[in-house]
Image (cartoon, helix red, strand yellow):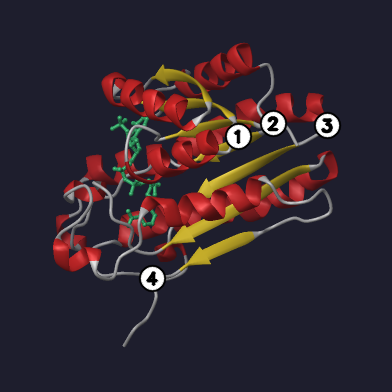
Amino acid sequence: MTKTALITGASSGIGRGIAHKFGEEGWEVTLVARRKENLENVANEVKEAGGKVHIFATDLTVEGNPDKAVKYAIEKMGKIGTLVNNAGMGRFEMVPDIKDESYQEQFQLNVWACMAMVRSAVPHFKKNGGGQIVNIGSIVGYLGISKGSIYSSTKWALRGLNESWREELYPDNIKVCYIGPGFVLTEFNGRKEGGTPEEQEWAMVPGDVAHAVYCVATQGPNSDIKEISIQVLDRS
Ligand SMILES: NC(=O)c1ccc[n+]([C@@H]2O[C@H](COP(=O)([O-])OP(=O)(O)OC[C@H]3O[C@@H](n4cnc5c(N)ncnc54)[C@H](OP(=O)(O)O)[C@@H]3O)[C@@H](O)[C@H]2O)c1
């Protein structure tokens, strides 16, 4: 197992939690997102935790930038062992109110950017004899939600890509896994980072998702975790 990871959306929330986990475990990581200052802060946290870290500030929805992110990670780390497609966003609107821009920006980041990252990384994985891809989807990649039709359909689309890539890539020892979490306390969709005291009583934290990602990244050579659905514990 190559202990290097390229993690998108690592400037906050779940991506930051994944970066922390890999850092604690002594991995070398390349962190990608738009906010450079946040990435620098996360990089310091990863270093303090014991990891080696590089940052690449870019907007992944712009053509050419996913390729540049992959290239940068290869230059810095030599090899990418695990690619974590985590950057994502959601807009929540009833169907009559859906704006063309919000449709486009969600599909561009949650689907197109993931595809572009994988398209760039696959030749590198093939050259190295394999690799691991982890796509952070959502619990709404399995169901529909009111006001979330576009967000939900981006996560279904990502699951479709995940299934197809599995079929295409397993002969090259490239493993592909979809992780679909439920509600996690992050700044997603304008929420307050860390959540309200009431939410903290029941919701998951980024470390819960990071735990699953690390489990996938460190699975044995004959194991191929296809997907993990992480639900909030039902205490009702
Ligand atoms: N929180 C939840 O309840 C939940 C549940 C299930 C799934 N998810 C999924 O988990 C993933 C992470 O979300 P989160 O909850 O951690 O929210 P978050 O804190 O808002 O994180 C989103 C990350 O994506 C990055 N990002 C956004 N637009 C980008 C762009 N154009 N180019 C590059 N990076 C971009 C953000 O960084 P910059 O703003 O610095 O670019 C940030 O690092 C998403 O795919 C989301 O759909 C979240």
**Which residue bears the numbered disc 4?**
232
- Please report contact status of discs 1 and 2: CB closer than 8 Å, yes or no: yes
Q: How far apart are marks 2 and 3 (CA)?
A: 10 Å
Identify which residue, 110 or 45, lies in the foreground.
Answer: 45
**Which residue bears the numbered disc 3?**
129
Q: In which quarter of the image is residue 33?
A: top left
The first of marks 3 and 1 along the sequence is 1
**Which residue bears the numbered disc 1?**
118
Residue flagged by tag 2: what amino acid is it? Val
**Which residue bears the numbered disc 2?**
122
- Image position, residue 130 (x, y; %): 78, 35
Q: How far apart are marks 1 and 2 (CA)?
A: 6 Å
Residue flagged by tag 1: what amino acid is it? Val
Q: Distance between the residues labelled 1 and 4?
A: 29 Å
- Image position, residue 202 (x, y; %): 28, 70
Where's the C terminus, which quadrant?
bottom left
- Please report contact status of discs 1 and 4: CB closer than 8 Å, yes or no: no
Helix, strand or loop at disc 4?
Answer: loop
Q: Residue shown at 34%/32% (left/top)? A: 11
Helix, strand or loop at disc 1?
Answer: helix
- Asked if residue 14 is positioned above or below residue 147 in the image, the reply reads above
Q: Quadrant holding ligand 1?
A: top left
| 3 vs 4, front mark | 4
Mark 3 neighbour density, 10 Å: few (under 14) some (14–19) many (20 or more): few
Does the residue tagged 3 have its C-beta within 8 Å of any atom of ligand 1?
no
